[in-house]
Image (cartoon, rainbow, N blue to C red):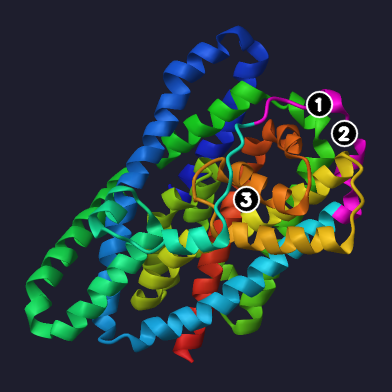
C-alpha cells in the first residue's frame, strides 16, 4: 500500500474511532485522550520536527553550492516574493468575499461562545522584519526559526561558493548530514498513519460533531473559501503548464500529512521528498523555494484572517466600511506572512488583525472551539500554496 493511501486510511479511521469514542464512551474520552491518543499524536509531530531543521539547512546549502553563485537565489527570491504577495492577496480576497456573501456571523448567538485562547499582542511589521535577522546561527538552528535558518544557510552557502575548494570538507559533512536526515525521514514516515490516526481521533473524540451545529455556516464558508483557492491554484498551474494533475498526485502525501498534523513545518520534509522523488522538481528550486514558502507563505492563514474579521464584524453588528475592509486586508496580508507553521497559530495572530480593524477581541472566543476542526484544511492549503508557487518557479526555470 502506498504511503498516501496509508495516511488517508489513518485519517478516515481516526475520524471514525474518535466519533465512536465520543458517542459510546464519553466518560472515558478524557482518560484515553490524555494517556494514549494525545501523547502518540504529539510524539509524532515532535519526531517530524526533529528533522525539519537539518533537512532545510543542509538541502539549502547543497542547493546553493550546486548553483555556484548568488544569481539564482536572487532570481528565485525576486520571482517568488511577487507571486507570494499576489496569491496571498487572492486568498485573502476569497475569504472576505465568501464571508460577505454567506453572512455567517449574522446567525450566531452569544450562547455559542466558548472559552477563547489567551490573547497575545502580535508583532508589528518592523519588529517582525528585525526578528528574522539571526544573531546566532546556532540559536536559529536550536529554536527552529525557519526564516533565520534560511538566512543563515544562504550566508554560509554564498560564502562557501566564494572560498571554493576550502569549503569542500564542510560540504562533505553537510552532504552526510543530509543523507542521514533523509534516511531518518523515510523511517519516520512509516509511522505517519499511526500519528495521523491518533491526532484525528483525539480531536474528534474530544470535541465531537455537536459543535458543528452551532457554527455550521461558519465552517462551511471557511471550507468553501479553501476549496475555491485550491481550484484557483489548479487553474494557475494549468495555465503555466505545470501539470496540475501530476502536481496534486505527487504532493498528496505531504497535503494529507499537513491536514492530519495541522503543521506545515511538520509537512515540509515530506514536501521536499515529494518534490524531488515524485514531481521531478529541480533540486535547487526545491531546496530553496519549499523551505522559504513554508516559512512565510500562508494562504490558509490569509483566508482565516479575512473571513474571521468579517464574521466577527457581522456578529457584533459593526458596520462594514471601506476603511474597515482596507484595515483588515492590509493587516491580514502582513499577518499571514508572519504566522507560525504550528497548530493554533492563526487564532493567536487574529488579535493583531482585529486590533488593527477596531473589532472586539472577544470575537476570538466564538471561533476558538472549532478552530482545530478547520485548522487541518487551512494547513493543507498552506502547503498547496508553497508547493504550487515552487512548481511555477520550477516551470519558469525550465523555460
CB under 8 Å between discs 3 and 1: no
CB under 8 Å between discs 2 and 3: no
Q: Is residue 243 visible?
A: no
For the point 54% across and 76% down, the residue is: 81
Q: Residue 87's x, y, as percent?
A: 65, 70
* Residue denoted by label 2: 108
CB under 8 Å between discs 2 and 1: yes
Q: CA distance from mark 2 to mark 3?
A: 22 Å
Q: Residue 377's x, y, as percent?
A: 63, 48
Q: CA distance from mark 3 to mark 1?
A: 23 Å
Q: Please tell me whether residue 218 is drawn above or below residue 168 in the rendered image.
A: above
Q: CA distance from mark 2 to mark 1?
A: 7 Å
Q: Is residue 388 magenta?
A: no
Location of residue 113 (image quadrant): top right
**Mark 3 or 1, closer to the camera:** 1
How packed is label 2: few (under 14 Cα within 10 Å), some, or many (20 or more)?
some
| Mark 3 / mark 1, whichever is N-terminal | 1
Left or right relative to 331: residue 71: left
| Mark 2 / mark 3, whichever is N-terminal | 2
Q: Please tell me whether residue 272 is drawn above or below residue 224 in the rendered image.
A: below
How packed is label 3: few (under 14 Cα within 10 Å), some, or many (20 or more)?
many
* Residue denoted by label 1: 112
The region drawn magenta spans 100-116
Q: Secondary structure at mark 3?
A: helix
For the point 23% across and 72% down, the residue is: 156
Q: Residue 231's x, y, as percent?
A: 71, 65
Q: How many marks?
A: 3
* Residue denoted by label 3: 378
Q: Please tell me whether residue 352 is drawn above or below residue 136 in the rendered image.
A: above
Q: Secondary structure at mark 2?
A: loop
Amino acid at each position: 500500500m502506498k504511503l498516501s493511501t496509508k495516511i488517508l486510511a489513518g485519517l478516515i479511521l481516526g475520524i471514525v474511532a474518535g466519533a465512536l469514542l465520543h458517542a459510546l464512551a464519553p466518560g472515558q474520552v478524557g482518560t484515553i485522550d490524555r494517556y494514549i491518543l494525545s501523547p502518540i499524536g504529539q510524539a509524532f509531530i515532535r519526531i517530524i520536527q526533529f528533522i525539519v531543521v537539518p533537512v532545510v539547512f543542509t538541502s539549502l546549502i547543497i542547493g546553493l553550492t550546486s548553483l555556484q553563485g548568488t544569481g539564482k537565489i536572487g532570481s528565485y527570491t525576486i520571482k517568488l516574493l511577487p507571486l507570494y504577495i499576489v496569491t496571498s492577496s487572492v486568498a485573502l480576497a476569497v475569504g472576505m468575499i465568501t464571508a460577505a456573501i454567506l453572512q455567517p456571523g449574522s446567525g450566531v448567538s452569544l450562547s455559542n461562545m466558548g472559552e477563547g485562547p489567551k490573547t497575545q499582542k502580535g508583532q508589528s511589521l518592523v519588529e517582525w522584519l528585525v526578528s528574522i535577522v539571526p544573531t546566532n546561527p546556532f540559536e536559529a538552528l536550536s529554536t527552529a526559526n525557519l526564516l533565520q535558518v534560511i538566512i543563515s544557510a544562504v550566508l554560509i552557502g554564498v560564502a562557501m561558493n566564494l572560498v571554493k575548494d576550502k569549503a569542500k570538507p564542510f560540504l562533505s559533512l553537510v552532504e552526510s548530514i543530509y543523507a542521514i536526515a533523509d534516511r531518518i525521514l523515510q523511517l519516520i514516515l512509516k509511522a505517519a498513519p499511526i500519528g495521523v490516526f491518533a491526532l484525528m481521533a483525539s480531536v474528534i473524540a474530544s470535541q465531537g460533531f455537536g459543535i458543528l451545529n452551532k457554527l455550521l455556516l461558519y465552517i462551511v464558508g471557511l471550507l468553501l473559501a479553501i476549496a475555491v483557492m485550491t481550484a484557483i491554484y489548479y487553474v494557475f498551474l494549468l495555465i503555466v503548464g505545470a501539470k496540475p494533475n501530476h502536481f496534486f498526485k505527487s504532493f498528496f502525501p505531504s497535503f494529507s500529512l499537513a491536514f492530519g498534523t495541522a503543521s506545515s513545518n511538520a509537512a515540509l520534509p515530506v514536501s521536499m521528498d515529494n518534490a524531488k522523488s515524485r514531481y521531478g522538481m529541480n533540486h535547487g528550486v526545491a531546496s530553496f523555494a519549499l523551505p522559504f514558502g513554508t516559512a512565510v507563505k500562508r494562504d490558509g492563514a490569509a483566508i482565516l484572517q479575512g473571513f474571521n474579521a468579517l464574521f466577527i464584524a457581522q456578529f457584533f453588528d459593526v458596520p462594514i466600511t471601506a476603511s474597515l475592509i482596507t484595515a483588515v486586508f492590509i493587516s491580514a496580508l502582513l499577518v499571514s506572512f508572519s504566522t507560525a507553521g504550528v497548530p493554533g497559530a492563526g487564532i493567536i495572530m487574529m488579535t493583531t488583525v482585529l486590533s488593527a480593524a477596531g473589532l472586539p477581541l472577544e470575537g476570538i472566543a466564538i471561533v476558538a472551539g472549532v478552530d482545530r476542526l478547520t485548522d487541518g484544511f487551512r494547513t493543507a492549503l498552506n502547503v498547496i500554496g508553497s508547493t504550487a508557487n515552487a512548481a511555477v518557479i520550477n516551470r519558469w526555470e525550465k523555460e
